Image (tube, rainbow, N blue to C red):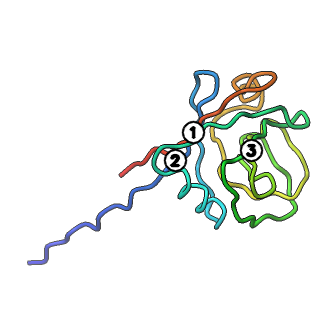
Amino acid sequence: MNISIPEPETPSAVLVIEANGKRLYANIEDNPSAKAFTEKLNPGGIEVRMRDRGGYGKSGALPWELIRSGERGTAAPGDVILDGGDGITVCYGENERDLTRIARIGGTAREELAKILGEGDVRLKFYLEWSE
């Protein structure tokens, strides 16, 4: 008689971004910058003051610097990208640039993202939720 013991599931994280009382959920990218970002967020998360960025997103300064693993590409609505080594941008529009994608917000249209992020300065909270 063979007994099969299931492998334990590895916990996985999703990035949560709170903006103006709403929660956005983003799938974390598989790259060294995203890994470093999630390690820095654990356990309590951070709050970042964000400003309008060229009509395509909101940008703010991180409390630490991260390695960049970027390449030339197009930032798309829902992308959460590393801005330089010490900033973060949440995109609601498109922009051609050097970018390091940290995460991607799923299931939210461009117009809805822009509305949730609002006009002018906004404080966003970034933290992780874990599943088993």
Work out which quarter of the rendered image holds the N terminus and state it: bottom left
Q: Which residue is mark 1?
A: 25
Displayed quadrant of residue 58: top right
Mark 1 → mark 3, Cα distance in angstroms: 20 Å
The answer to whether residue 119 is left or right of residue 126 is right
| Residue 14 badge | 2
Residue 23, horizontal then vertical, whole percent = 56, 30
Residue type, label 3 = Ala
| Residue 61 badge | 3
Residue 103, horizontal then vertical, whole percent = 65, 50
Displayed quadrant of residue 65: bottom right
Residue type, label 1 = Tyr
Residue 21, horizontal then vertical, whole percent = 58, 21
Query: Mark 3 vs mark 2: which is more N-terminal?
Result: 2
Q: Is residue 104 above or below residue 35?
A: above
Q: Nearer the viewer, residue 18 or 26?
A: 18
